[in-house]
Image (cartoon, rainbow, N blue to C red):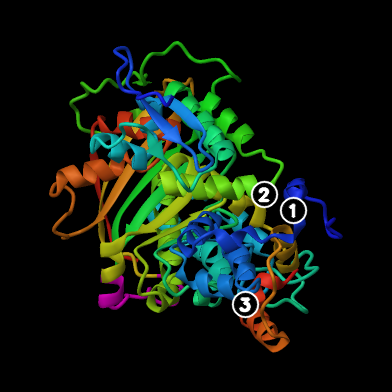
Amino acid sequence: MASAGSGDEKAATVTLISSDNEHFEVPEAVATLSQTIRHMIEDGCTDGGVPLPNVTGRILAKVLEYCNKHAAASDKDELEKFDKAFVDIDDQATLFDLVMAANYLDIRGMLDLTCQTIADMIKGKSVEEIRETFNIKNDFTPEEEAEIRRENQWAFDD
Amino acid sequence: MQSRHRIFAEDLLLAAEGEDHFDRVPDSLVLIIFNKLADARSLGRCSAVSRRFNALVPLVDDACLRIDRVIPADGADGGAGADALGLAGAPRPRAVLSHLLKAMLQAVLKPFAHCDAKSGAGAHGGKHAQLQHHSPAQVLKNFSSIRNLRMELPVSDVGTDDGVILKWKAVFGSTLQSCVILGGTKVERAAGGTHASVPAAAAADSDATGDDSGSIPESFYTNGGLKLRVVWTISSLIAAATRHYLLREIVKEHPTLEQVALTDAHGQGTLSMGRDQLKEFRDKPLAVAAAANRTQVPACNMKLRYAPLLELSDGTRIHGATLVVIKPVGEAGGIGGGRKELDDFIADTFDGPFREAVGVLSKRRTYLLEMNGF
């Protein structure tokens, strides 16, 4: 039975429901790191839980890991260490999932962190390396590509 | 799929089964990523990765351009110039000034005649044979909607002796609007890791602020004195004016710019222009200094504050600490008017211990100086 959530006297909680129907009961103080959820709480439409059709349970768990830490800790160094470990992920799919989730849930800190991580993966790489890392298809014709390289030659001297 | 190229730590993050995750990321998020990337060269490469990236790169708001090398106009070794600015042992301020101006012109201005945004392949020790010079304006051509630009020069403009600290921040519209300079003849950092027990910054000296004679304390002269401060001031203003002049093509070609900051790798000086300043830059013509690659510096009022020894709360000690605030003569917001804004600007100029130094110095007695334009 899904818990209603907000009857607790000590700390109000809210239930988040992932796309694959996993339920997470979360203190409001933590959940409101997400502006999206914060607005829903303020608008009073969280009874019975908040469905999040764009976020799987696996990703939501990771998101809540981030929110829990950032809602609790205030020491800058500690948070920095946590953030670094948080994005030290083995697979790209998860990283991009987190970017999308941070965007959907409007969690500014997490969005900055994950986007910065991807930016750092791009920085310093050659064009071929960028394509290879992210599996991006080269959809230029050879003439187009030559033209672009010529226009931006300063970027390619290596 | 293993990379045949250099191994990166991120190779762990090679996409599984050939999936391009960017496909499911909307343009707005890709732009956020590009804005965080900011580095102009990386963005230039991104624009050759795919059509989509190519279309998005010009929409970037923020760009940061690190300039690799500066080429002296006459091909002479650019490094020598920086050392040319020592202290002239010369006695009279007037002689020092003209000598100083010449030394500054050589040391500072020539190096900036050509700003090389990217050094050519295999360049060693300044050989020019096959180098391609790319001006910053050329590099930034693709970034047609850029709003925030940050450029970083490789070295500071003003050569200083060891231990001397000199930091400046200048705001220019079409001409100088204000400049804050913080200098010290010697800086001693606290011994590693220890936090001094001094609770708040104190200016320890025998000339208490109760000195009513109105004259500059004796120690000001023994510490290198007024002459040195003049050298700092003029050097910093010339550096700022030179950078300002450098920007004219870029500002003209990027009407969407709202914020420009031109710093150097050593963090010595920052030239900053905000939205109002950029508007003025575009509307009013620049006054170019005679025979020099820089903007004319107008006649100025300077407020100088001095402390023979500053002890900051983190244990840093600054000897001969000087704060100079410069504003053009006759401007409506000149010294004495628009007080609050100016005070805020001054307080915000630097970070860290220098911020504190500015705060302490601001409370000291003020000495007023005037300077002609140059």
| Labelled disc at residue A152 | 3
Residue A11 image-quadrant placement: top left
Q: Quadrant of the N terminus of chain B?
A: bottom right
Amino acid type, callout 3: Asn
Query: In the picture shown, does residue A100 fall above or below B188?
Result: below
Q: Which residue is mark 1?
A: B16
The image position of residue B195, as x and y in percent, is: 51, 15
Q: Which residue is mark 2?
A: A92
Label 3 – label 1 distance at C-alpha: 31 Å
Residue A58 image-quadrant placement: top right
Q: Which is the main secondary structure of the residues drawn in magenta?
A: loop
> Do pointers 2 and 1 mark residues of a single chain?
no
State left or right for residue B334 relative to residue A36.
left
- How many numbered dots are placed on residues in this image? 3
Q: Earlier in the sequence, mark 3 or mark 2?
A: 2
Helix, strand or loop at mark 3: loop
Label 3 – label 2 distance at C-alpha: 29 Å
Return the residue nearer the eye: A138 or A6.
A6
3 or 2: mark nearer the eye: 2
